[in-house]
Image: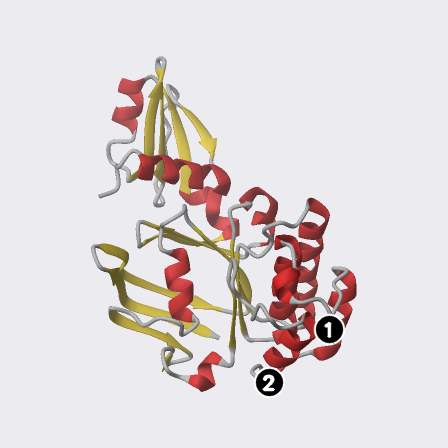
Amino acid sequence: MKIEARNVSKSYKQKQALKHLNMTIEGPKIVGFLGHNGAGKTTFLNMLSGLIPATSGELFVNGQPVFNCPTILKDICFIAESGNFQEEMTIEQSLKATSFFYRHWDGQLAKELLKTFALNPKDKVKNLSKGMASALGIITGFASNAPITIFDEPYIGLDVAARNTFYDLLIEQQQDNPRLFILSTHLIDEASDLFEEVIIINEGELLLQRNYDEWHEHVIAVKGAPSVVEHVTASFEIIFKQSFMNEMTAVIYLDGKTIDDLNVKLESVSLQEMLVYLSKQQKEGLYK
């Protein structure tokens, strides 16, 4: 599967959620789709799922426009953070209704996963706890067998054991039935080892798209005396910069360059740290 965003923008009244977004995502692979709250992630995923149109630009899957294209939408399963199911339906009814939409639906897998997550098929959706509703979303996503399967914060309310079950299932499904999984999550430290590719959206724009194995080759933290760090990083694109006491930290894109100055410390930056830095920038109003 191939997703192409061509100069995609989305505006809501006075807010521009996406700004001239250009990127290509190809699968099968597991993609970490990341960004701080309000970065534009969910807006893009809603557009990819055909739920909302772009204000301008075009979004394609396998060369076809996504919006108002039923044949493409049958190949995309979007499990949102909440509101995925009819409240008055039972779990059994919800899964049956969903099975009519997805052409590769795996009913046997759905039954097995109901047991895995200890869900009663006769329970009504409206009576489910947050964790149980999340489990139903996970079951639906995996059983859909959709070539593009999207999980947006899929495990709200689930404990560590249940989240680990989700991670194990994700690996198992990708081995048995490879597809393009897109996972948006704030629990990055837990999930990052699953990612084959990382996409970071910031303030509605594509900030970074890299294979996960290349991550540490492109982003690094430079620490040292403020004047020295300012000098060393002057020619680099700076993602985040702050001073504390007599030390400055600057997170930069290496962009194929190297830093050989012995008067600064170079440290790797985890994905979780990267999102914290971006969140701080957003709160301080440094991205405008």
Q: Which amino acid does label 2 sit on?
A: Phe
Q: What residue type is labelled 1?
A: Leu
Which label sits on residue 97?
none
Which element is circle 2 on? loop
Q: Residues within 10 Å of mark 2 (few under 14, many from 20)?
A: few
Locate residue 13 relative to residue 27 in the image: left or right.
left
Q: Residues within 10 Å of mark 1 (few under 14, many from 20)?
A: some
Residue 284 or residue 171, whichever sits in front: 284
Which element is circle 1 on? helix
Q: Residue at x 61, y 75 (%)?
A: 144
Q: Which of marks 2 and 1 is in front?
A: 2
Q: Where does residue 2 sit, x and y in percent of width and height? A: 44, 73
Instruction: Indicate the colouring scheme.
Output: secondary structure
Residue 19 or residue 23, whichever sits in front: 19
Q: Where does residue 178 sit, x and y in percent of width and height? A: 61, 71
Q: Where does residue 56 sit, x and y in percent of width and height? A: 23, 69
Q: Which residue is drawn at 57% across and 42% down?
A: 189
CA separation, marks 2 and 1?
15 Å
Of labels 2 and 1, earlier in sequence is: 2
Locate residue 36 relative to residue 233 in the image: left or right.
right
Q: Residue at x 26, y 25 (%)?
A: 230
Q: Where does residue 251 sit, x and y in percent of width and height? A: 37, 34
- For residue 59, what is the image quadrant? bottom left
Q: Name the residue under label 1.
A: 109
Q: Mark 2 points at which residue?
A: 100
Residue 97 or residue 187, whichever sits in front: 97
Q: From the image, which quarter does the C terminus lie in?
A: top left
